[in-house]
Amino acid sequence: MASRVTAFRSSLDAPTPVSGTAPQASAAPEALAELIARYERPLLQYTHRLVGDSEQAKDVVQEAFLRLVKDGPRDEDHARAWLYTVCRNLAFDQRRQERRVQTPPELSKTDPPTVTELLVKREEGVAVQQLLLQLPANQREVVRLKFQAGLSYKEIAAVTSLSVSNVGFLLHVALKTLRRHFEEERRRSEVQS
Amino acid sequence: MNPQDNLQNDPRLTAFALGELEPAEREVIAAQVAADPQLQALVEEIQAEGRWLEEALEAEGGLSLGAERTSQILATTTPKVVPLRASPKPARSWARAGGVVGLLGAIAASTLLFVKSSRESEAPVEVNAALAPTGSEVPKANSASVPPATPRSVSARDGEAEDDLLGYSRSPVPAVPAPTMSARGQPPQEPEETNRGPSTNKEGLLRAIESVEQADKFEGRARGFAVGGLAGGPVGTRATAGAGASAGALGASGTAGRGGAFAGLSPVSEPDPTGGEVYQEAGTQGFVSTVEHPETTFSIDVDTASYSNVRRFLNRGQLPPPAAVRVEELVNYFGYELPAPEDGRPIGITVDVTDAPWNAERLIARVALKGRTTHGDRARANLVFLIDASGSMQAPARLPLVKQSLRLLLKELGPDDTVALVVYAGGSGVVLPPTPVANRRQILAALDRLEASGGTNGAGGIQTAYRLAKKSLVPGGINRVILATDGDFNVGITDRRALELLISEEAKSGVYLTVLGFGMDNLNDATLETLADRGNGHYAYIDRLAEAKKVLVDELASTLVPIANDVKVQLEFNPAKVAGYRLLGYENRRLANRDFANDKKDAGEMGAGHAVTMLYELIPAGRSEGVDEQARRYQRTLTPAADSGELFAVRVRYKAPGDSQSQLVERPVHESSGHFRGGSQDLRFATAVAAFGLLLKGQGEPGLDFAQVAEWADGARGRDESGLRRELVELVQKAGRLTPAVANLVDQSTFMDNLPLFSRSLRSCGPRPAGVVGVAKLELVVTFGADGKVENVRMDSSPKGTELWSKCAVQQAKAWRILAPGRRQQAVVPIVLGP
């Protein structure tokens, strides 16, 4: 596993000027830090579901940011969809390598829920993951891109290589299905209590 | 199939609801939706679903790249990104300089937890919450003191080999979630192995960002204490300070330069309506100095809904969300034995004071108002039931319970009283015009016909209900709209405002509003409470038939017969005797002092037999706790009344029903302090309930825990014929059992995961201690045993003035726990209490 990290790090080996002092007015690192702070979480959440392993997800997202710095778009609107696209492609590359294409692991069994997940479960009464698992993978993905990543239909279409109307259809069906499950869940919990 | 059916199954409707349609298409769909209430309801439903998904997915997983990876990314930026390419939308360029932290909102104190092995250097850690005047700008000094990590720094770590990298991912570094550890199957690192260099400044910054962000997201409602700042070793110290500074800058807005001896770090909400009194946003913990603000004014609240709601959560095995806990409603849920008012006034005042049970250096003052009881023959009642019959009311705990409750109430009404039924669902309609209760069978039949279906349009129904009530208005009688709903108004936020306005307007007609909340899931607590307030009414939450009986039968008289309107309470403290005070609860009931005597200013209503209890926690002058010095300084300028020995004076203003001019009752309170155990049963019980509320809100005090509270409450149960006090004791015990369960949820020894819990417990120590000048840097060192329990806590570096706060923090930290890490670990928690 460590080798993967090393591989990514090699991209840092490029001889870049080393400045011992702080470059004045170099705002970029802060801007990038802000961008990372804002998107690392949703990107990791999204990627994690694609690769099924949090370490791999981190590798992928890190790589996506590195590529962004190198040759990604500079404005945030484009950067956002761009980052998702790169993460998605890298995730699929990895899965291909590992011949895991057939088993997109949304929340694999071996992956213990995080504290936050458990708390959310407690708070919401219904685990959103469980609900999402009722959906086919392609619907699940657009739901995450829409509501977790906050992407527009157009951006989702760009990321997933689907048409905008296809995205709209998938979301429509997914939301309908979720509403049904949600209602069932609610009724069930009420009957219990 | 008609076109509407088609649209219901049309992806364009979903796209429309989510704001994803192009303008041309949007107009077409909007027109169809506007014409069809069912489509409207569906649109609302889709939007609500989207919001739910956003929230639920947002909270999913506490993932972060971690400091190491982030710094690697950042290390590549300096040469490549600057100068910036022009961007198509310059305003949104991510590469633009900006307040890194600015987006995170107001932040008070900063802490960052990280684990380091016990042998690691104990070099001073600097964290900084120096707050800039606005959050939008990172101070220049910041960019200078936080040089971007250079490739050299990265390769330096490279030189330490893979092991070191792994080390970062394992426990010694906080920012990397522990799954790394297990995922890589490495044995836990022994403390002896660790001899790492200091973190770089950059990492400090990133951790700060990360932790702020996480804490922020984790508990969006619990602002006011967040996490920022940093870590470092001998070399990193300076840089570290810089990192902390930028984190502090982020949170700057709203916190800088707040006055008030106790106000310190608390974010302050809104333009202050209290004329300078400083309160924290919902969940007040800070004491207010009597020197600066000797008076406090608020509107009474006789709502009790929060208690039933809290009970519902606890009985389901969940801790209630802190925002759902309103301390005053918990306290006032219970009946207390209060003397009837003297001399024909409608309201009597009872006050008693004892030591605070959780801190012998403070006092608890109970101020209770008791309304006159009616004597049998009450005026005729004109009741209009407005019943939410939308689809969401279908569940057993809703519409069926509403019907049962109304049947109960019906039995209590006289034959001359009238009852009308209005339902609102997709449309709203009069099911039963005002009908004398003598016609009981007709009323019951109408009730039985009610069925849940369709969406909810709250506003239409309310208008109809008020119209009916006004039509059959009984002059001098009881005119009331009784709204039964799960609060799930499928109307947008602007409509909600309109609804409030509408109700405020209708309330002037002399028709009062009672709001009864029903239901399990989407009870919209805040909306209902607001509606009841606007409608000169009160709000109760009914979760079972017994509760309906309590509210509608046992308390019928007070629920229906107003005896005093716009009841306002003002306390004026004597700074010679009381240095600081805080009101427990009533966060959303504060009034500006100047509005006390302003009869145009609306306030709470009291019904016959109603009682209202308020609890204050006081810091007596002359005991410890910071404020004293200041108090003594001003004491000389006090009026002669200050020597009277009075602790405070209570003033109550109210209007008799129908009057527009208020009357004033005033009562001075002399020191009558004694040991808590010697206090009256009701005082002790009420105090225990308040303490319960504080604990549930995460605002506990040192020396306060659920077991202790249960004991106090149990010792003050008295006769308790209704069994309600016994039930409270059980709820407290339940909450006590649930609380450690939350901490035990931690399934990894990751401090980041614990952070929100831990910081919440520190937050309970209150904001910045009075008497601290400038920035105070503290370092809390917590040693966890192999079993995950805290073995030892100490506060390194405790600058003058922070002793008390430190004591509290140490106390709080003792209760921390991490999931058995299998070895001893030490956490260092740098804390900055900034100005």
Image (spheres, rainbow, N blue to C red):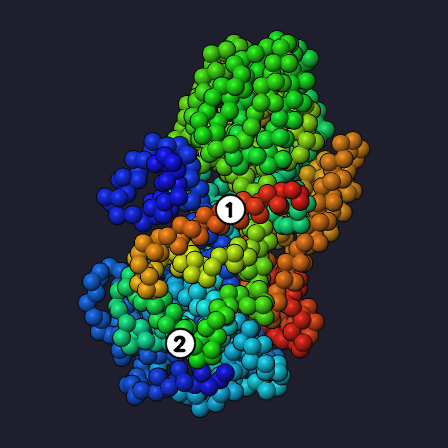
User: Which chain is indicated by disc 1?
Assistant: A
The one nearer the camera, B489 or B340, is: B489
Q: Position of residue B737 (x, y in %)?
A: 71, 54
Vertical side of B117 occupied by B461: above or below: above
Residue type marked 2: Asp
User: Which chain is indicated by disc 2?
Assistant: A
Vertical side of A185 occupied by B123: above or below: below
Outermost right residue: B719
The 10 Å Cα crowd at callout 2, few under 14, some 14 to 19, many 20 or more, is some
| Inter-mark Cα distance, 2 to 1 | 35 Å
Pointers 2 and 1 within a single chain: yes
B145 sits to left or right of B166:
left
Q: Which mark is residue B480?
A: none
Q: Position of residue B381 (x, y in %)?
A: 58, 14
Vertical side of B32 occupied by B738: above or below: below
Provide the residue designation for mark 1. Answer: A180
Q: Position of residue B471 (x, y in %)?
A: 47, 12
The one nearer the camera, B704 or B497, is: B497
Q: Residue at x 45, y 48 (%)?
A: A176
Q: Of the residues under marks 2 and 1, which one precedes in the sequence?
A: 2
Residue type marked 1: Arg
The 10 Å Cα crowd at callout 1, few under 14, some 14 to 19, many 20 or more, is few
Q: Residue at x 19, y 67 (%)?
A: B86
B100 sits to left or right of B110:
left
Provide the residue designation for mark 2. Answer: A93
